[in-house]
Image (tube, helix red, strand yellow):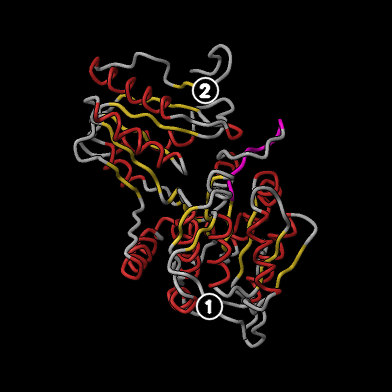
Amino acid sequence: MATKMELNPTEVWDGNMAATHAMRQAQIDVVSAYPITPSTPIVQNYASFLADGYIDGEFIMVESEHAAMSGCVGAAAAGGRVATATSSQGFALMVEVLYQAAGMRLPIVLNVVNRALASPLNVNGDHSDMYLGRDAGWVNVCTYNPQEAYDFNLMAFKIAEDLSVRLPVMVHQDGFICSHTAQTVRPLSDDEAYNFIGDYKAKNPMLDFQKPATYGSQTEEDWHFEHKARQHHDCMQSFAVIERVFNEFAALTQRQYNIVERYDMDDAEVVVVALGTTVESARVAAKEARKNGIKAGVVSLRVLRPFPYELIGKALKDCKAIAFLDRSSPAGAMGMLFNECVAAIYQAEESKKPIVLNYIYGLGGRDIKQSDLLNIYDTLHKDAQAQKRTHHTQQFIGLRGPQIGFF
């Protein structure tokens, strides 16, 4: 029996430690892991908690991130509650197995501490790994600070393990800016957290020898299409479960989360749409822009997959000008957030077809400054007044030297 840990009503944790405590409180059966910056402390802390008797489970140290997710797949198929963490190149090495986990409908929780992808080699944060794995069939949830890294890990287990969802979940947090930044966190007690998640409910466990099950079978053209259609359907239908879990968590903690978050949007004419820690920076800038007479707002996503097309369309349909901030190299295209949100806006009923701009920023951990965000709001305001776009649709913020990134 694991020893319970006494926590203070308010702790000072970075995002990695916050995620670890949520994993500890979930009383995971197996963590299969391989370290990589900046996610290493999550599994390192977990191993320490296990060694100190705070966890009754198994920690498997493997030879690569591909093996780490393979170990998670095996443990989850056997009937256990399973989680791990990774970043960047390790995440890229996991990609093959991410598709296996989703296709087998295994409710694994993966903490992705977002970091740039090589080459050039870079250990700092951007959203390249988040964007790489968004179509692997996992539910993807996004956090902005250590408190949310804790909260969303608890909710991730409850969402993934719901029998109407039964899909793995990624919990994203920004590398270093969140993962290594200490802030106040208000945790639940061990009993409260575990009772919120609930006991693990195995479905078709391979160790139930009375009911043999097969995982990873070959289907070819006969049934592959049907399996993928069912997987997609259940992912899209998971909004109801996600919203219910958000509401249950709010009733317990008074911390309410929404699938699409709106800030100062009641009368907003110009809006920034962003993910991760940039959301909080954009809210500060929006407040400052309003002092200058600009009706500025911020819209952000808690759930990247399934993508909330209808909610995004409704949130943005009355805006005059919108900037979509993508923290990943588009590599020959518009940014993902721009593309998907613009599609949602143009499908929304009564959409005013706003002016839309795509800003690429913060690659490899480069800061986005308040002055950058205020300049974006100023550009949006001028375009809204002119009722036309006065700049390239796609621009790069904070690029040294001449502006070579635009479209």
Position of 49 with respect to 393 (left or right) is right
The amino acid on which the numbered mark 2 sits, given as a three-letter code, is Gly
Q: Which residue is drawn at 50% across and 58% down?
A: 12
Q: Which mark is residue 379?
A: none
Return the residue nearer the eye: 233 or 9. 9
Which label is found at residue 200?
1
Q: Find the distance from the CA under tag 1 to the CA under tag 2.
A: 47 Å
* 336 or 297, nearer to the observer: 297
Neighbor class of circle 2 (other Cα within 10 Å; few <14, some 14-19, many 20+) is some
User: Is 114 situated above or below 105?
Assistant: above
- Where residue 305 sits in the image (x, y, percent)? 46, 50
Which comes before the other along the chain, label 1 or label 2? 1
Kindly identify the amino acid type of the residue bearing the numbered disc 1: Tyr
User: Magenta includes 154?
Assistant: no
Indicate the position of residue 280 as horizontal and vertical percent values.
40, 42
Q: Nearer the viewer, mark 1 or mark 2?
A: 2
**Residues in magenta?**
113-120
Which residue of the protein is positioned furthest toward the bottom in this rendering?
210
